[in-house]
Image (tube, helix red, strand yellow):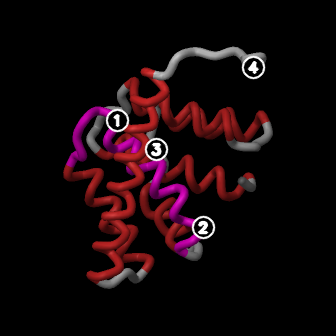
Amino acid sequence: MSEHSARLKAEFLALVAWADGDFDESERQIFLDVLDRSQVDEDTRIELVDFLDHSPEREPAMGRLAALPLADVLPALRTAWLLAHADGELHPAEQALFDELADRIGLGDGARSTLFELLDLSQRADVLERALLADAPLRSASD
């Protein structure tokens, strides 16, 4: 992931996390995991970690993300959907961000429905994967 893509993804994740007014611990963990996997320099990482304390500005962040092709936006949407469900429910303010981004990208009703179905499937797959890994016997690399 490029530094630019990592920044846009982090901005959207922070917007979603702050949408309900509380960037809770489960959301923080997902956000930090994403930052740890991104390939950004230390100065950029410090700047992005600052979103744990305050939300980025909505309008510029949404505009930058919406300017990208959908194929480039999908990974951010998938991760943000997981983050939005981290506390067990999708808050209406979080849903509003996804709806706004879908509008800005220009998705019609059919494509929007397909997008949300894809995001739901991705989230369910993540839950199932975590359950499987939690129940799987531990093995060492030499097994």
Q: Examine the image and state in which quarter residue 32 appears.
A: top right
Query: At x 36% / y 41%, what residue is drawn?
Result: 18
> How far apart, in angstroms, are the residues tagged by discs 2 and 1?
23 Å
Chain-order first, disc 2 or disc 1 = 2
Query: At x 59% / y 39%, what residue is drawn?
Result: 34
**Dot 3 crowding, Cα within 10 Å, few <14, some 14–19, many 20+:** many
The amino acid beneath tag 2 is Asp
**Dot 1 crowding, Cα within 10 Å, few <14, some 14–19, many 20+:** some
Which one is nearer the viewer's eye here, 79 or 11? Answer: 79
> How far apart, in angstroms, are the residues tagged by discs 4 and 3?
36 Å
Rendering coords of residue 99 (x, y %): 30, 67
Query: At x 38% / y 38%, what residue is drawn?
Result: 128
Rendering coords of residue 58 (x, y %): 42, 57
Badge 4 element: loop
In this rendering, the label closer to the viewer, 2 or 3: 2
Total residue callouts: 4
Magenta span: 70-91
Residue that carries the numbered disc 1 in the rendered image? 86
Chain-order first, disc 2 or disc 3 = 3
Badge 1 element: loop
Chain-order first, disc 1 or disc 4 = 1
| Label placed on residue 72 | 2
> How far apart, in angstroms, are the residues tagged by discs 1 and 4?
31 Å
Residue that carries the numbered disc 4 in the rendered image? 141
Answer whether labels 4 and 3 touch (C-beta < 8 Å): no
